[in-house]
Image (tube, helix red, strand yellow):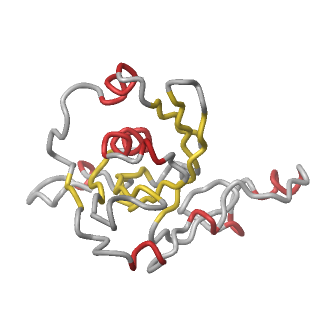
């Protein structure tokens, strides 16, 4: 949400955008860098911060980024990284401090019990949910006990971090392409 401006109409504010800290798991070690963090973050929303703390030499199990998310849209569950050799890696997204949300449609505006798609879900005999508690990141886990885990947060929003299109630059370098699936 943009900062408050005196005498500005409430309609000018985007109350649907909220910053979330995300953890992206299963990224191959060779892609654990700031550029890939930016690419993944931009594929999900607007990147606000990157946690680039020195955790005993860099990121360990995941990349941690803060992204502005439209809460009127379903949460994203995974991103696909496609390497220059065509290999695909599915990377799981976990959200820190994720509020209660619907396990059927992935929205925070209501619970699973009150979902308008609940009847459709029951009629299809689909007993599996596309969303669940697994989207929540464990706070205070083992990764955060190593080193000063908040030491290297780099603020991105409102600043031009890198010149040019990072996805195009990565393609030219034979790096990785980020594909986001819901």
At x 21% / y 49%, what residue is drawn? Answer: 156
Q: Nearer the viewer, residue 131 or 173?
A: 173
Q: Nearer the viewer, residue 6 or 75?
A: 75
Looking at the figure, which quarter contains the C terminus?
top right
At x 36% / y 19%, what residue is drawn? Answer: 172
Q: Residue furthest front?
A: 57
Looking at the figure, which quarter contains the N terminus?
bottom left
> Residue 22: x and y, percent?
43, 59
> Residue 121: x and y, percent?
81, 53
Q: Is residue 97 above or below residue 52?
A: below
At x 43% / y 42%, what residue is drawn? Answer: 31
Q: Residue furthest left?
A: 6
Q: Nearer the viewer, residue 73 or 76?
A: 76
Q: Residue furthest top?
A: 172
Indicate left or right for 105 with 26 as reference.
right
Indicate left or right for 7 with 45 as reference.
left
> Residue 97: x and y, percent?
45, 72
């Amino acid at each position: 949400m943009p900062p408050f401006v005196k005498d500005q109409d409430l309609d000018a504010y985007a109350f649907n955008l909220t910053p979330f800290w995300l953890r992206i798991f299963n990224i191959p070690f060779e892609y654990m860098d700031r550029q890939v963090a930016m690419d993944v973050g931009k594929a999900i929303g607007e990147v606000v911060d990157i946690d680039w703390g020195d955790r005993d030499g860099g990121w360990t199990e995941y990349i941690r980024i803060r992204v502005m998310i439209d809460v009127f849209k379903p949460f994203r569950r995974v991103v696909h990284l496609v390497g220059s050799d065509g290999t695909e890696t599915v990377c799981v997204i976990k959200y820190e401090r994720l509020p209660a949300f619907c396990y059927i449609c992935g929205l925070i505006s209501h619970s699973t019990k009150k979902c308008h798609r609940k009847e459709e879900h029951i009629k299809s005999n689909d007993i599996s949910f596309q969303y669940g508690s697994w989207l929540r990141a464990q706070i205070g886990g083992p990764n955060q006990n190593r080193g000063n885990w908040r030491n290297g947060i780099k603020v991105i929003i409102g600043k031009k971090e890198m010149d040019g299109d990072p996805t195009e630059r990565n393609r030219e370098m034979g790096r990785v392409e980020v594909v986001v699936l819901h």
